[in-house]
Amino acid sequence: MGGHGCSAVDGHLNDDNFSKPMPWIGIYIAAASAACLVAMAADLIQGFRFRKFWFPCNYFSINATSLTLIAVAAKLSVDLNTSMPNRRDQLAKLTSAAFICTVMGNSMPSLGTMGNEDLFMNIMALGILVITIIVNICIQLGTGAIFVFWKEHALFMFIMLVLLIVMSFSALIVPTTKRYLEYKYDKKYELALKEAPSDINGKKLVCKLRKDLDKYWMMAYTCSPQFVMGRSVTCTASGALCLVSAAVLGEAIIRSYFMAWSVKFCTGDSDYKWSTSLVLVIQTIAVGVGTIAPACRWLFAIRFRCPYRGNKKEWRKEFRVEKYWIQRLEEMKDSPLTSSIFKHRNRYCRRVIHDSKNLVLDMCISMQIGIVFTSKLIRFLSIFTASKVLFFSELGWELKRKLRFCVAVSSNDSEEDSLQDTKKDLSRFVLHLEGEEALVKLIIKRNCDATDHWFQLGRKRQPKYLMNLLEKSSQELRGVAEFDLSDQVPCLHDEEPPNCWALPVVTLTSIALALPEIDSSAIRQLRNGVSEGLVYVKHMEKLLDVKADLSNIKKAAEAVWTEVDLYHKWLEVDLKKISLSKETPNEVLEELAQIAKNKFLVLKNAHLAECLKVNPLKWPIKLLAAHSMYRISQSLILNSERINHQTSEKLFEAITVMISDILCACMTNLQQVISVKCLNSAIEEREESVRHAVFILGKSEEILKIHGHKTIPNLDSYQMACIDEWRSSHKTKNPWAFTPSSSEIDTLSPGSTDLCIGID
């Protein structure tokens, strides 16, 4: 009824009640468009911030949420019934069509982050949405609901369809490129490991890890699936198409407002009323902002291909379709049909189906070659047009670089040579596809020092409390063996759970906080140091706990520490109350051991007895925490005669040394953790994982230097990650020895030897 265009007198529907909610629907459309705008702007800002001018889609990508928002934002384009008579109404319909083109081109790199199933489902959903929009626009052109800008609408429909086809066929290369680059990453990773020196400590270890991380980052950055898709020729073509769609929209707006004589609109107002102006403004801004990223990808491709200008041999290669574009389709063609429906057909039907499959795939291969060739032609024309401008730009940059070099050459000869050697070394670790040889030089030129920012940022955030705590550790880290004398402590159960790194630290800290007459500043420093140290322990246990399932024990440590850190309680037992009610350290230990034993027995006798029959690794977290407290408290009580002659301060210091030894021993695995983070993460997450590893290295620089002065047992990588293996390597004739810290030794008088009993 409302789709008669100019035929309606006032442009309104007859039913006023039906039209009342329409402005609210317009607000809903504007809100969905604004959400897309904010997400695209966030990606744009992040791209500029991190100098990623191919603009990865971290916030706005093709997924269920974004497709729903796009469908809502496109409501005006698919509205068949509402009359849209005036200038802003018709422009709003046109802007919605341009908006769809923009978001498709903008989100194309996000295809690289998807798995095969998600890729298929999202492309299918996008295809249904785009086809629906095109069909609805065609209907409106036929009914007269869209009565101006029909040429622009026709062009937008063509661009939408082309972008859909380009995205669909680009998705086919994602599994192939991921598999190929994953293989190359593994090979280069092995090469980096072989070249790395071994048996180094302290400052040299930090330098070695930095060089390794530079290589890992270069590999992770250049094989990032979003970057691979963002620099592809089809993504370049989509950027050019987005520029065309934005230019067409700009032409329509200028013609509508500044050349009113060339366009005639109907009078009246639509049922959306003033909300169409809001939609028009927001979607126009969204088109402008969303076009920047595709345009920059287009310019990036021109820049990294421009070294080929004037080289006829290279230009001939430019139009060659690389194998990875059609490899997936050829694999599908070579694979036989395995469907149960196909197997039960007779021979003639199976032959027809097989031939039909091959025919369809041959057509798809031809289409893929055509799409890639056309995209390369667009890129060639773009480069041909822009080559002279870029030539003068490159000339200016080269002159500027040479002048800067001439000014500094007298003092920085060795530094310049070192930088050139570094670039040459890193160039071997740039992962690229067939036909992307020019990328190596460009990446090295632009991204040689990309890890320095994150290393310096980590350096500024070094854990000062943890470093002070680790300085108190003993030379041989004997506290790893001293905290638990399980072979001398009466057992609460036939089988006992193994130790992890975090739970003994948390239990010892709980005991230290319960000791009477301890200075509040010492307690605060210990608590803060343990809190910072547990962050590292969590990373280490998460990445290196591959042979033993210690998940329940780690959960117990996290649960207990949350209570200790926030409320000064251990399993709802007030540690401050114990410290005020007891006078000697021995009384505190006996109280905690008895509480832990009672809790263990209560849990065992109540409703958890069945749990004790299974593997101790599966015990509930409270049972594990109670068992750890009992075992460690009893270990400390075993030396009760000596404890009776010590003050709380000296026992607190001894326990602090134990905690420091355990944390220091755990963090000898930092080098292994950094290496594992660079290899074991998924290819989609590897760049972020390597960047985080660089940040951790910056934070851990001083910690690694502390390790360089310690005596480390000769263990393999798996044993180094296991606290019980450390304990086995530290067994001595005298298993109990409070090892004083260096600061304590300095403060002891020559005649005061009672605290050094048992020191080897």
Image: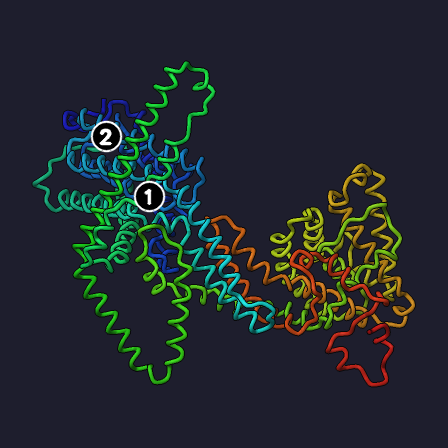
Quarter of the image for residue 179 reads top left
Q: Nearer the viewer, residue 606 or 755?
A: 755
Q: Is residue 387 visible?
A: yes
296 lies left or right of 466: left
Relative height, residue 343 to residue 51 (above, below): above
Q: Nearer the viewer, residue 489 or 634?
A: 489
Q: Is residue 30 visible?
A: no
Residue located beneath label 2 in the image? 137
Query: Measured from the top left, where is residue 296 in percent x and y?
Result: 28, 54
Amino acid beneath label 1: Lys
* Residue under the point 51% across and 58% down: 692
Query: Measured from the top left, where is residue 492 in percent x and y?
Result: 86, 48
The scheme the figure's colours follow is rainbow
Dot 2 lies on which element? helix
Give the spatial CA distance, label 2 vs label 1. 38 Å
- Specify the farthest residue to the left: 261
Residue located beneath label 1 in the image? 323
Res 232 label: none
Amino acid beneath label 2: Ile
